[in-house]
Image: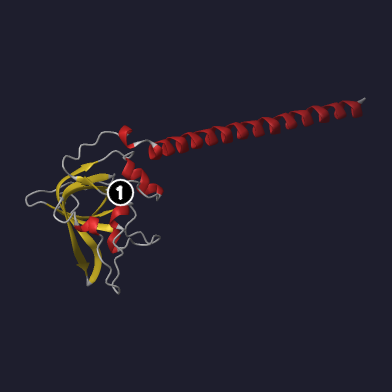
Amino acid sequence: MKRKFLSSIGIVIGIVVINVIISAQHSEKEAFASALKKLRAEHRETRALLEEPASSKPSTSLGTATRITFNDLREYRFSRKANNPIPDKLKALQGKEVSLAGYMIPMSEALDVTEFMLVQMPFFGCCYSVPPEPNETVMVKMQKGKSTPYVYTPIRVTGKFKIEETKIDGFVVSVYEIEASQVKETDPKDKDVIQHQAGTPTPGGF
């Protein structure tokens, strides 16, 4: 009788353990399914932003400024050895008003910033990343008498475009310059910001 009782106890304990394991696995599966569903939703949202037609873009007032991107700037194949020509469409913007989205890297000041580098992604100077090439950075100088606070989120810079080298310690760090009349935070869902993060070309160019 005692043996049967112990056997029954063992069976009950085994059933309980199995139920606990099944329940835990079910919870893990639900958590995984929820995370996967969220990831897919975020992917669809990003894809929709990238594929939406130009007519449905969020309205961003650029005035008379020409919208450019870092993909446009990279078309100038800058080389310290080869004398590569500057593309005509970049030459045509010399001295013209442009608008470019990116991230601010202050040169010295942290409050009343008057000069900074504009880069495509916010990891300039990180020891684990390859620094951008001179045709992937823009030296921004605020118009005389103007300054801007440091902004760590995406910004849109508007101002006069110049093809001009900036050297630091004898090294060319940028081949472009913008004399900025306006620096303002932009929507993280700004199409240019999304495409820069995705590393995909911006269709349409100028």
* Viewport quadrant of the N terminus: top right
Q: Around disc 1, counting alpha carbons within 10 Å, would you say few (fewer than 14), some (14 to 19), or many (20 or more)? A: few
- Residue drawn 20% across and 58% down? 91
- Residue drawn 30% across and 73% down? 82
Is residue 39 visible in the rendered image? The answer is yes
Q: How is the image coloured?
A: secondary structure
Indicate left or right for 46 with 122 as reference: right
Image height of 53 relative to 107, above or below: above
- Residue drawn 26% across and 60% down? 87
- Residue drawn 29% across and 38% down? 187
Q: How far from the left and from the top, in percent, is residue 58?
A: 29, 33
Q: How far from the left and from the top, in percent, is residue 143?
A: 10, 51
The answer to which quarter of the image holds residue 53 is top left
**Residue in front for this viewpoint, 8 or 188:** 188
Indicate left or right for 33 with 117 as reference: right
Q: How far from the left and from the top, in percent, is residue 149?
A: 18, 46
